[in-house]
Image (tube, rainbow, N blue to C red):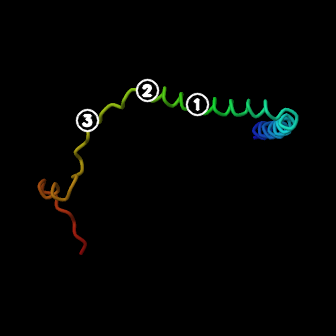
Amino acid sequence: MANDRAIGGGIFAGSVIGIIVYGLLIFYFPLIVLEITAFVAVLVLLAILAWIGYTMATTPPPEPITDIPDSAPSSPSDATATGKEEQKPA
């Protein structure tokens, strides 16, 4: 539990420092920082789409289900045909 709190505190501190550094970089070098930010955003989005496409293309199709147990009737007419009558409330 204490380890999780330490990791959470580190993530929080790193995020706040990142916000401050990014703000300072935007203030002093706006064009290059925005270009890099846009490039990284597009790169991440396209990498995720490529990963999804690769996974869909290389995953084999699921095996068809052929062994379905015949324990329950699928419709009321099947119950009467097998001799099993539905119980009606009194």
Which of the 4 image quarters holds residue 64?
top left
Mark 3 vs mark 1, CA separation in Å:
39 Å
Rendering coords of residue 51 (x, y %)? 54, 28
Residue displayed at 16% across by 54% down: 78
Residue at left offset 48%, top offset 29%? 53
| 87 w.r.t. 84: above or below | below
Q: Nearer the viewer, mark 3 or mark 1?
A: 1
Callout in the foreground (1, 2): 1
Please state the horizontal and vertical placement of residue 6, each as a whole percent of the image: 80, 37
Q: Secondary structure at mark 3?
A: loop
Left or right, 81 with reference to 75: left
Q: Secondary structure at mark 2?
A: helix
Which picture quadrant has residue 39?
A: top right
Q: Which residue is identified by label 1?
A: 46
Viewer-nearest of labels 2 and 3? 2
Indicate the amino acid at tag 2: Ala
At 85% across and 34% down in the image, what residue appears?
Answer: 25
Q: Is residue 4 left or right of residue 87?
A: right
Give coordinates of residue 57: x percent, y percent: 43, 26
Residue bearing the label numbered 2 = 57
> Which of the marked residues, 2 or 3, is nearer the chain's N terminus?
2
Question: What percent of the width, then of the height, locates residue 36?
Answer: 74, 29
